Image (cartoon, grey):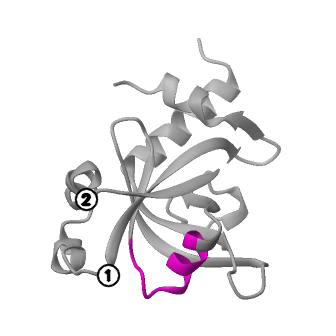
């Protein structure tokens, strides 16, 4: 029987595997402070987050300057609920560009509409090497965990 923390870690892994959209936070290349934007996310076989971004985008310039970042994903928010009770996970790590052949199938399987711009010369795939995750599993249930511990709980 899983502990509440392990249950939350499995749920976080499932949320990551579903991909979708996430808030990407980077360090602003112009001022050094936090900068957050919305990105599409997919996950590779090692549960590593992938994004496809244009080199023209501000967040791409920020990642090229300092690759430390975080991604926050959450379950859908019901309009009748307190959004602060929504299950969510924030993953912290560093992004690096990867070759399209390493990421394209995972990303386009999750976001087929991205095929329209995936081949443009200014778009690149970036993969996060995640170190830690912060899980909010409900009121009073927050867990800081090593990302590899989430990945190890998930089926291959």
33 lies above or below 111: below
Q: Give the magenta range.
A: 53-64
Could you tell me residue 2's position as x and y percent?
Answer: 61, 17
Q: Residue at x 63, y 57 (%)?
A: 86
Dividing the image into 4 quarters, which one contains the N terminus? top right
- Disc 2/disc 1 C-alpha distance (Å): 12 Å
- The answer to whether 106 appears left or right of 31 in the picture is left
Task: Name the one closer to the observer, 8 or 124.
Answer: 124
When the figure is inspected, residue 56 is found, relative to residue 114, above or below; the finding is: below
User: Residue 33 lies in what quarter of the image?
Assistant: bottom right
Q: Residues within 10 Å of mark 1 (few under 14, many from 20)?
A: few
Reply above or below: 107 against 140.
Answer: below
What residue is shown with label 1?
A: 122
Image coords of residue 142 (percent x, y): 77, 42
Secondary structure of the residue carrying tag 2 is helix
- Per the rendering, the mark at residue 113 is none
Give the numbered dot on residue 100: 2
119 on left or right of 18: left
Position of 46 with respect to 76 (left or right) is left
Query: Magenta includes 57?
Result: yes
């Amino acid at each position: 029987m899983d502990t509440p923390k392990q249950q939350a870690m499995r749920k976080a892994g499932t949320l990551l595997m579903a991909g979708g959209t996430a808030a990407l936070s980077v360090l602003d290349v112009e001022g050094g402070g936090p900068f957050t934007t919305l990105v599409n996310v997919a996950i590779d076989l090692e549960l590593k987050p992938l994004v496809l971004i244009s080199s023209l985008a501000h967040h791409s310039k920020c990642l090229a300057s300092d690759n430390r970042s975080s991604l926050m994903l959450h379950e859908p928010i019901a309009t009748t609920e307190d959004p602060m009770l929504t299950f969510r996970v924030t993953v912290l790590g560093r992004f690096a560009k990867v070759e399209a052949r390493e990421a394209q199938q995972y990303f386009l399987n999750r976001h087929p509409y991205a095929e329209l711009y995936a081949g443009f010369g200014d778009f690149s795939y970036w993969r996060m090497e995640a170190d830690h995750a912060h899980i909010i599993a409900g009121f009073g249930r927050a867990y800081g965990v090593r990302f590899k511990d989430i990945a190890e709980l998930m089926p291959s």
